[in-house]
Amino acid sequence: MSQEPRLVEVRRNVLKQNDVIAGELRQRFRQAGVYTVSLVSSPGSGKTAFLEKTLSLLGRSHRVAALVGDLATENDAARLRRSQAPVRQITTGTVCHLEAAMVRSALEGSNALEAWDLDELDFLFIENVGNLVCPSSYDLGENLRLVLLSVTEGEDKPLKYPTIFNSADVAVVTKIDLAAAVEFDWDSALANIQAVRPNMQVLRVSAKTGEGLDEWQRFLQARVAEGALGKLALDVAFPGV
Amino acid sequence: MHELSIAISLVEGAQEEAAKHGAASVSAVHLRLGPLSGVVKEALLFSYDLAAEGTPLQGSKLIIEETAVMVFCAACQGRRPIRSLQSICCAICNAPATEVVQGRELEVVALEIRQ
């Protein structure tokens, strides 16, 4: 053994293992034609209520399913099952975020009979653990990442948690039926979102009154159509790839 | 706080890379860390020693190089720094920037090993 340490260059993403699994999931979703949406937000911002409504409404015309992450309890899965959609809870124990491997095992279930057939689905929703910090680091293979912000949380949340807002594709402002009661400053909230993620699309919804949910569904279907067109263009340009 | 699980992945990855280079021991791991990685430097340094305990990396040093966020500015056509994380705009011309080209790094870039 030589005495002097030697410096060797390597290049390795620390989350390589997660990224590899996420890449495999993304490919499976694409092949099965499932559009996958993940939801991140702080605890209590209305992810589950928004998702429950989404599953019920979208479930009328599409085949939908959801995975829901929490540290403990099956409560959210039980709530979401009221929509009649297949739902599985991922309990993470003490882990504060979902990882791609957790999504993969939840899809597989505990035995071969329980594995979800992705070909039978149009949309898969993945509700992350309520946390505005840790989930930003982990790719889950999703097509679209939503970050939710409820009007009761304050307009400056995006400035306090820029990383997660920057990692998301679309912001959804929830509980807008309470906006007037809490004197929510829309201009300031929208400016803050744009400051940390320029050009980010913002949707406004109330799971309670249903306001904004039609627009949300139209938005989602347009995204799916864009993706299908993109895939079609690729298939034409590179047949058989 | 997910830095402990990050540190465990880091130690596992560094061990694999060290083995590829036929290392007998590792004295330091060099990591590039971006402000948009979602990982806090101090928490990662704290977790590293715990994660390395009982592995061949026990006692090794974690050396973190923090990168700056860089964007491609479509307005002034170049790779530019940003004003701040709370204002992801080109620091030169102030145009909002949508294309982050650096700042999400969480990667091992070098190892100090004895063979």
Image (spheres, coloured by chain):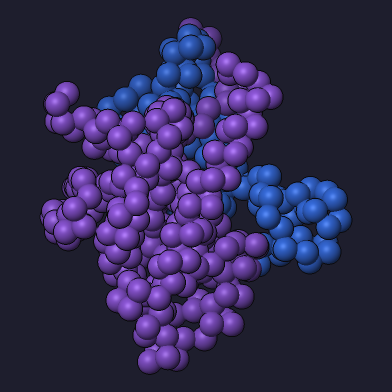
> Any idea which chain is the blue one in this picture?
B
The quadrant the C terminus of chain A occupies is top right
Work out whether residue A39 or residue B37 is closer to the camera in this orientation and state it. Answer: A39
Question: What residue lies at 48% left-to-right and 37% top-to-bottom?
Answer: B62
Question: Residue A22, relative to residue A213: is it above or below?
Answer: above
Question: What residue lies at 78% left-to-right and 64% top-to-bottom?
Answer: B95
Work out whether residue A28 or residue A16 is closer to the camera in this orientation and state it. Answer: A28
Question: What residue lies at 60% left-to-right and 32% top-to-bottom?
Answer: A232
Instruction: Name the quadrant containing residue A45.
Output: bottom left
Instruction: Name the quadrant containing residue A36.
Output: top left
Residue B25, given in percent of the width and then of the height, sits at: 43, 18
Work out whether residue B2 or residue A219 is closer to the camera in this orientation and state it. Answer: A219
Q: How many marks?
A: 0
Q: Please state if B91 lies on the left or on the right of B46 as rendered.
A: right
Residue A25 in view, yes or no: yes
| Chain A rendering hue | purple
Q: Please state if B18 lies on the left or on the right of A50 as rendered.
A: right
Question: Residue A7, relative to residue A159: is it above or below?
Answer: above
Question: Residue A207, relative to residue A5: is it above or below?
Answer: below
Question: What residue lies at 37% left-to-right and 85% top-to-bottom?
Answer: A178
Work out whether residue B31 or residue A218 is closer to the camera in this orientation and state it. Answer: A218
Residue B3 in view, yes or no: no
Q: Please state if A196 lies on the left or on the right of B46 as rendered.
A: right
Residue A133, given in percent of the width and then of the height, sits at: 41, 57
